[in-house]
């Protein structure tokens, strides 16, 4: 008499193993919490790449829900970070794990589809429910609904989330540089000579470049593969990093220095000594305004890659960025050459246009050199904290 026994196991969905690997490279630790027994859970975790056969599985990496549940709160807090696979778990175990990880300082994202997953989805920093198999209760408790029920979509969430965060940082770096430079130039000039080189209308145009066009150009950059190779950002890490402060200070110092030199010595440098005073001052102030705008145009390219020397990488695919830069350049030429009464400018000859372009262009090699300078790990503003 022959008997045949066989078992069935649902295979992992296509691309899940690749998605798990991308998450792990990005510094996102993937943990599996399931109601299956511990042996089935381990097999699935190995197939999906959550566990690796070559690694030494440390104590508590694979655990049953009842064991975790029976620990005290302090014990759960100690071992939560080690857990990779939890089998035979209940919704309460999932909730306790999320709670312990958050108390340990982690940023926690949870996926779930059932009504019982609602507490864990609500407790997590980011709750992701399933759009096809998920219940309405789960969807209501989540922050993001995965429409295709595929774990690969989590990679897209991480990718776009990091892209938005990075784009905000790019815009802040650009905006602070413009603000510091414009404020310093007008303040020093006003307090020393009683005259400001940048008029209200010119500052309005600079503000339009900075707030509207700059935001559109930098905030719409598409995600890159490099974003998924960066470590995650902690919940208490500053938005303005030391790398950004370094770039802001150097570029602002360069702009302020060059334009203040033009403010006080511009008539001699630009060979305007033979013109009448009113004409010479107007040409000088137009050069200062034009050079200042070109500094922002060139520096906006620097802001695309705050920590990379190659600022042109991916530029071909950034059609909106290129379009906005081209539009800004055309409008600047029209303002200088044809809007004299409105913007208090005067047409410039080709030599002075070259001066302005060169002043702006220098920010490119300057940025490349500065990016070679290492920055300390301690956040810049912590040096000024009263607690230190």
Image (cartoon, grey):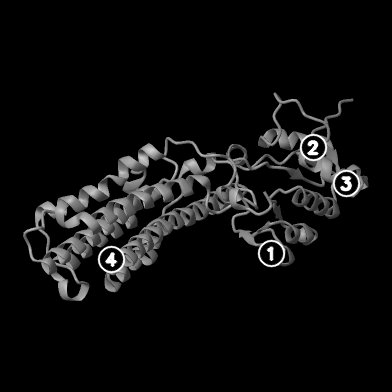
User: Can you tell which quarter of the image residue 192 is in?
Assistant: bottom left
Separation of residues labelled 1 and 3 (CA atoms): 31 Å
Tell me whether circle 1 and circle 4 mark residues in contact (CB < 8 Å). Answer: no
Separation of residues labelled 1 and 2 (CA atoms): 28 Å
- Name the mark nearer the viewer: 4 or 2: 4
Separation of residues labelled 4 and 2 (CA atoms): 79 Å
**Residue at the limit of the structure toward the bottom, as seen here:** 342
On the image, numbered disc 3 is attached to which residue?
74
Separation of residues labelled 1 and 4 (CA atoms): 64 Å
* N-term mark: 4 or 3: 3
Mark 1 burial class by Cα count in 10 Å: few <14, some 14-19, many 20+? many
On the image, numbered disc 4 is attached to which residue?
193
Asked which secondary structure carries label 3, the reply is: helix
On the image, numbered disc 2 is attached to which residue?
40
On the image, numbered disc 1 is attached to which residue?
139
- Name the mark nearer the viewer: 1 or 4: 4
Which one is in front, 314 or 39?
314
Residue 161: percent from the left, percent from the top? Answer: 55, 54
Mark 3 burial class by Cα count in 10 Å: few <14, some 14-19, many 20+? few
Tell me whether circle 2 and circle 3 mark residues in contact (CB < 8 Å). Answer: no
Residue 215 falls left or right of residue 34: left
User: Can you tell which quarter of the image residue 177 is in?
Assistant: bottom left
């Amino acid at each position: 008499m022959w008997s045949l026994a066989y078992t069935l196991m649902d295979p992992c969905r296509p691309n899940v193993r690749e998605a798990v690997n991308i998450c792990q490279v990005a510094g996102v630790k993937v943990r599996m919490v399931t109601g299956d027994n511990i042996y089935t859970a381990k097999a699935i975790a190995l197939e999906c790449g959550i566990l690796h056969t070559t690694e030494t599985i440390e104590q508590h990496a694979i655990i049953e829900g009842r064991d975790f549940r029976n620990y005290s709160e302090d014990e759960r807090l100690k071992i939560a970070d080690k857990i990779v696979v939890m089998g035979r778990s209940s919704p309460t175990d999932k909730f306790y794990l999320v709670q312990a990880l958050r108390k340990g300082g982690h940023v926690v994202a949870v996926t779930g589809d059932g009504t019982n997953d609602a507490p864990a989805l609500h407790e997590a920093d980011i709750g992701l429910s399933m759009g096809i198999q998920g219940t309405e209760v789960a969807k209501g408790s989540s922050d993001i609904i995965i429409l295709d029920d595929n774990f690969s979509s989590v990679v897209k969430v991480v990718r776009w989330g990091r892209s938005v965060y990075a784009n905000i940082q790019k815009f802040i770096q650009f905006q602070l540089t413009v603000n510091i430079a414009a404020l310093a130039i007008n303040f020093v000039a006003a307090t020393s000579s009683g005259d400001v080189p940048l008029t209200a209308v010119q500052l309005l145009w600079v503000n339009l470049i900075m707030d509207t066009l700059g935001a559109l150009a930098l905030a719409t950059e598409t995600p890159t593969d490099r974003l998924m190779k960066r470590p995650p950002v902690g919940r208490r890490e500053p938005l303005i990093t030391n790398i950004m402060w370094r770039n802001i200070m150097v570029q602002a110092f360069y702009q302020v220095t060059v334009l203040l030199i033009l403010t006080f010595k511009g008539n001699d440098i630009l060979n305007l000594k033979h013109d009448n005073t009113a004409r010479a001052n107007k040409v000088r102030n137009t050069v200062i305004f034009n050079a200042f705008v070109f500094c922002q145009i060139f520096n906006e390219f620097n802001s695309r890659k705050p920590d990379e020397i190659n600022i042109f990488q991916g530029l071909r695919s950034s059609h909106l960025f290129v379009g906005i830069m081209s539009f800004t350049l055309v409008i600047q030429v029209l303002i200088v050459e044809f809007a004299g009464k409105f913007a208090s400018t005067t047409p410039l000859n080709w030599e002075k246009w070259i001066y302005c372009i060169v002043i702006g262009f220098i920010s490119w090699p300057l940025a490349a050199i500065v990016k070679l300078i290492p920055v300390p790990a301690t956040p810049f503003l912590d040096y000024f904290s009263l607690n230190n």
